[in-house]
Amino acid sequence: MSKLPKITLYFWIMKICATTLGETAGDLLSMTLKVGYAASSLILVSLFAVALGAQLKSKVHHAFLYWAVILATSTAGTTMSDYMDRTLKLGYMKGSILLVSILMIVLAAWKYSEGSLSVEHIKTRKAELFYWFAILFSNTLGTALGDFLADDSGLGFAGGAALIGGLLGVIILGFYFTKISRVLLFWLAFILTRPFGATVGDVLTKASDQGGLNLGTLKASLVLLGILVAVIFYTKNRHPAVDLAPELTA
């Protein structure tokens, strides 16, 4: 039995919610609570390791466990990216290029080792590890890319979110109206939902004079956590015969 969820509309709603929550929760720990980027990264990477260990030991799909690992990669990715970009002073552009390179290496190694990047054909522990490390680095990349678009590009938080949202719209059109590889479209969407979440998170938390809604990291995190938990419960408890969301095969 597959340990991964079906790729439906609900999956993408939860993915965007989890990655946005990862941005706000990571900032809550590192900046609002003043734990710092390095210490926050160590704490969150440790939590990721614990959650991943439980996921690897599981024999079946557990929705809350799966999304806990996704959330752990997203929060850890937020503080890791900030540590690289701000503490190590790589900057958003260099940080993004470095993380893109690492992600491409992980995906290439996965493809070479397993023959496919399809999430429907993860049958070995090695492929499962490749899957999770690809997610970890894609979520780390998303923070750096989202910050680059919001700060260095001049688009601002809302402009960055609009640009990434437009690119995701193009991918959706590609899915329905072209014969482009579904695996390629899946990973493009998966990678882009992270900077989309990062910029949306900034819109929610930043001050109004910075183009944000000034909710703060704590209030935004609580709202997003509530939405994520509610959608997980809904998808777990709805009748299996009633599937209003088309499955998007990857």
Image (cartoon, grey):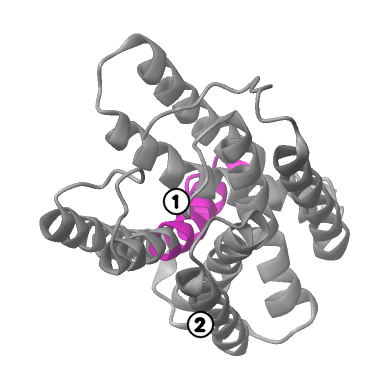
Identify the mark at residue 87; answer none if there is no mark: 2
Query: Is there CB contact under 8 Å for labels 2 and 1?
Result: no
Q: Secondary structure at mark 1?
A: loop
Residue 96: image location, x then y, percent? 37, 59
Q: Which mark is residue 44?
A: none
Percent x, y of residue 224: 78, 51
Where is residue 218? Give x, y as percent. 85, 65
Which residues fall within the magenta stretch? 136-156
Q: Is 126 left, or right, of 135 in this rendering?
A: left
The answer to whether residue 111 is above or below residue 250 is below
Element under disc 2 = helix
Q: Quadrant of residue 66?
A: bottom right
Q: Which residue is outermost to the left?
A: 112
84 inside magenta stretch: no
Which residue is at a point 56% across and 67% down the rendered structure image? 78
Residue at image mark 1: 1
Q: Main secondary structure of the magenta part?
A: helix
Mark 1: amino acid: Met
In this rendering, position of residue 98 left or right of residue 145:
left
Query: Front-most of 202 and 70?
Result: 70
> Could you tell me the amino acid type at mark 2?
Thr
The earlier-in-sequence mark between 2 and 1 is 1
Q: Is residue 207 above or below residue 29?
A: above
Q: Nearer the viewer, residue 140 or 206?
A: 140
